[in-house]
Structure formats: structure tokens, C-alpha cells
Amino acid sequence: MPPIAGPARSAALLTAALILLTACGGGKDSTTAESGNSEGYPVTLKNCGRTVTVDAAPKRAVPVDQGSTEILLSLGLADRLAATATWTDPVLKGLEKANAGVPRISDNRPSSEKVLDQEPDFVSASFESTLAKGGVAPREQFEELGVPTYVSPADCTAKDNSKDGDGVRTGALTMDSVYAEVRDLAKVFGVPERGEKLVAGLRARVRKATSGIDASGTSLLYWFANSEAPYLAGCCGAPGIITRELGAENAFDDTHEEWPQINWETVADRNPDVLVIGDLTRKSQTAESAAKKIAFLESNPVTKNMDAVRHKRYVLLSGQAMNPTIRTVEGVELVAAGLRTFGLAG
């Protein structure tokens, strides 16, 4: 995507509508502190190397990744969203009505102009690459126009995004980063109690899904997209959360890349017990849907004799469940259920 075009013109159009914020360098953690007036503003938080200050609750937010949008919808903030963008899946069940009232300006990453046309007072994303050169636009360009930005801490905590690809994990991701995002956004919008309630519900679901399960010795392979050069999960992203919660093993636990592209001969040699397959509705890669992925696996001479393929041990997940979002909990639930069905969980 191109960077923001015509900043002077855009600034003139937006000055009256935008809330003035300041942003400067900060730590890599994501913690929030509140001070100021009786309504709890300004809110200042450290976020992915920046310090962001929000002077008032956003009224025209534009979350530019599905994961961020679904958090805000789950917090009951549909009326504060001017638009949304970049979707891989149908909206989380139960949020259909709320989502229907939020304009979607692009199924994929929108141009910066499309975002600015919404006169946003807050822009949030699930990935650093979304708000960077080559994405919608660098965070600095929004901030120069007085628009504060926020990126999920799950994409910057113990992770190096400086090189090409989807980044490299320097440490194992946990759901705590996702819960931190929920709490941060709830505080930014002035609804911290809703954030705590959502986190408590997610924690309870994980406990219920993993109660009594032991999948030790069972290997899982996570395939997100692309049939020619498949994107498969490395050790330590959202699939790593799912795997660790269930006590299982990731077939590619030896790579710290978030989504390395690995050839099918190597996959067949690893011969995982279960294939966790992304069922995506977008159209930016080959074999996006689970149906197309399974058809490929069962017809390709390299993969069709793998144990998981011969025994049809497939677990289908949304793309959002395979990314670090609140739907990673859905991933834990569905993979746990699949392992029990296959008789692979004690």
C-alpha cells in the first residue's frame, strides 16, 4: 500500500475533527496508566515502542485488522467505529448484528486515503506490518495528523518484525498479551469494566477446554495458507499457545519464524498426527478455504499418504483463531475437541 498522499491537504480536512494526541518512543510492553479529569482522561499507554496519549474516548475509531475490530465489537463499541478493514473470515459468532452497522472499507489492507476519509480519531491494528511502510501507512504519518495509533502487543512482545516475512519470535507468546490488548482498548474507550469481564470469560473458556486433557506425544501441524509454498506455524505464535495449552507438540517447533514457508517433502517427512487447517474466506493466496486445502492434501502425491491425511485427522480453524486474537481461545476449544474425537487426548 502507498504511504499517505498529500499530508497537508489531509491535515486541513481533518484538523477540525481530530483529537490532538502526542506519541513518542517508549518500552516494548503494553501497560496503561490513567490520570487527569474525573472521566479518566487523558489515558496514556506504552505500546510497541511508543507512548500514546488519548485525550478523550474515541468516537470515530478505525480498526484496520479483523482481530482488533472483533475486540472492539466484543466490548460493545460498534457505535464508536467509523469503519473497519482487512478480514480473513466471517465475523465472530454473536457479533453479526453489531458488525453489520460498521462500514467495511476494504476486505484487504486499505489505502491510507480510505482510512483518512473516515476522519478517524483513533486507528488500531493487530500487526505492526499493517501500520508500517508497505501496509496502510506508518504510524508516524497518522500521528502527524493528530490520529493516535495502537498495535496489538501480541505482535511486538518478544518478537522481531524488522526483517521480511511475518516476523520471528524471540520468546513464546502467551494469552496474556491478548488480554493486555483487551484491557488497553477498554481503557482507551473508557470501559475498563467491560475489558475485565471479557478477559474473565476468555480465561474461563480456556480452563474448560483444557480440563483433564493430555495430548503429550501428539504432533500438530498448522497450515494457514498457500499450497505451492505453504505457510506453516513455527513454535511460538498463536498456534504455540494452542499446542502448549493442550500439552501437544508442534511439528515445526524447531523454527521461531511466525509463519515459515516449508516444502511439502519436509512436511511429509515430519508426518504429523493431526493437521490444523485454516479455513479462510479471503482470496489473496492459493488454497484459502479448508475444502481446497483438503483437496490438495488428498490428491498431491507427496502428502496423500501422510497418516493425518489417510485417517482424515483434520481440525478446521478460522484464520483469526490461528492469529493472536481473542479467537485463539476458539482455537484451543476446537483443537481440544478434535483431539478428543480422534482419541489422541488422554
Image (spheres, grey):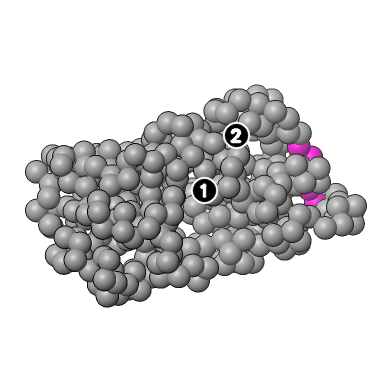
- Quadrant housing residue 275: bottom left
**Is residue 340 in view?**
yes
Q: Nearer the viewer, residue 206 or 307?
A: 307
Q: Residue at x 21, y 42 (%)?
A: 248
Whole-Å distance between the Cαs marked 1 and 2?
Answer: 16 Å
Label the magenta part by its dominant secondary structure.
Answer: loop
Does residue 122 appear to the left or right of 220 in the view shown? Answer: right
Q: Which mark is residue 9?
A: none
Dot 1 alpha-carbon crowd within 10 angstroms: few under 14, some 14 to 19, many 20 or more: some
- Quadrant housing residue 212: top left
Q: Position of residue 317 (x, y in %)?
A: 33, 59
Helix or strand or loop: what does disc 2 sit on? loop
**On screen, residue 98 above or below 237:** below
Residue corresponding to mark 2 = 48
Q: Residue at x 29, y 72 (%)?
A: 300
Helix or strand or loop: what does disc 1 sit on? loop
The residues colored magenta run: 16-21
Q: Quadrant of the N terminus?
A: bottom right
Residue corresponding to mark 1 = 166
Q: Position of residue 81 (x, y in %)?
A: 61, 56
Q: Position of residue 71 (x, y in %)?
A: 49, 49
Q: Quadrant of the C terminus?
A: top left
Identified by mark 1, the residue type is Asp
**On screen, residue 61 above or below 105:** above
Residue 20 falls inside the magenta stretch? yes
Residue 202 falls inside the magenta stretch? no
Q: Nearer the viewer, residue 256 or 80?
A: 256
Does residue 13 appear to the left or right of 224 in the view shown? Answer: right
Q: Residue at x 70, y 44 (%)?
A: 139
